[in-house]
Structure formats: structure tokens, C-alpha cells
Image (cartoon, rainbow, N blue to C red):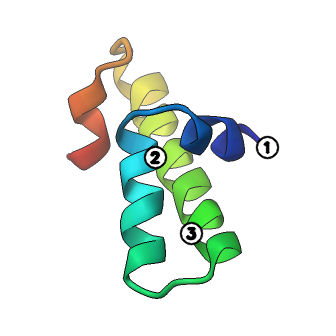
């Protein structure tokens, strides 16, 4: 699962994951939320033709 790899490295997706877990969400649910966020960002990249930018995650 790509989201598992994304939360293991330091970065924005890890921060999102840790924030959800800190708010009391189960770890599996937080991991699925990160996977969904990744899907939304990648879909936007494909539609707009833009390259990866870290700030796109919070848009």
C-alpha cells in the first residue's frame, strides 16, 4: 500500500496520519484517509498536467 510507505517517511502525509491518530482515529482508518488524500492529489495532477508539489496536498 503506497500510503503505508508515505507515512513511514517524514513528510506531509506522515503529518496527516499522525494528526488523525492523535485525534483518536484508529490507525487503519488514518491510513485509508492518507490513501484517499494521495488519490485526490494524483487525480488533480493528471487532470491539470501539473508536476508534484508538496503544497498541493493541503489545497
Left or right, 28 with reference to 44: right
Q: Residue 35, relative to residue 32: is it above or below?
A: above
Give residue 22's position: percent from left, percent from top: 40, 76
Q: CA distance from mark 1 to mark 2?
A: 14 Å
Q: Residue furthest right?
A: 1
Q: Which residue is mark 3?
A: 30
Give residue 24's position: percent from left, percent from top: 46, 88
Give residue 19's position: percent from left, percent from top: 36, 66
Q: CA distance from mark 1 to mark 3?
A: 13 Å
Q: Residues within 10 Å of mark 3 (few under 14, many from 20)?
A: many
Q: Which residue is mark 2?
A: 14
Q: Quadrant of the N terminus?
A: top right
**Callout 1: helix, strand or loop?**
loop
N-terminal label among 1 and 2: 1
Q: Quadrant of residue 33?
A: bottom right
Left or right, 51 with reference to 33: left
Give residue 41's position: percent from left, percent from top: 42, 39
Left or right, 32 with reference to 59: right
Q: CA distance from mark 3 to mark 2?
A: 10 Å
N-terminal label among 3 and 2: 2
Q: Which residue is mark 1?
A: 1
Amino acid at each position: 500500500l503506497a500510503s503505508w510507505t508515505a507515512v513511514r517517511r517524514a513528510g506531509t502525509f506522515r503529518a496527516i496520519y499522525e494528526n488523525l491518530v492523535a485525534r483518536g482515529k484508529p490507525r487503519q482508518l488514518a491510513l485509508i484517509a492518507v490513501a484517499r488524500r494521495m488519490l485526490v492529489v494524483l487525480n488533480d495532477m493528471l487532470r491539470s498536467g501539473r508536476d508534484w508539489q508538496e503544497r498541493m496536498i493541503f489545497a
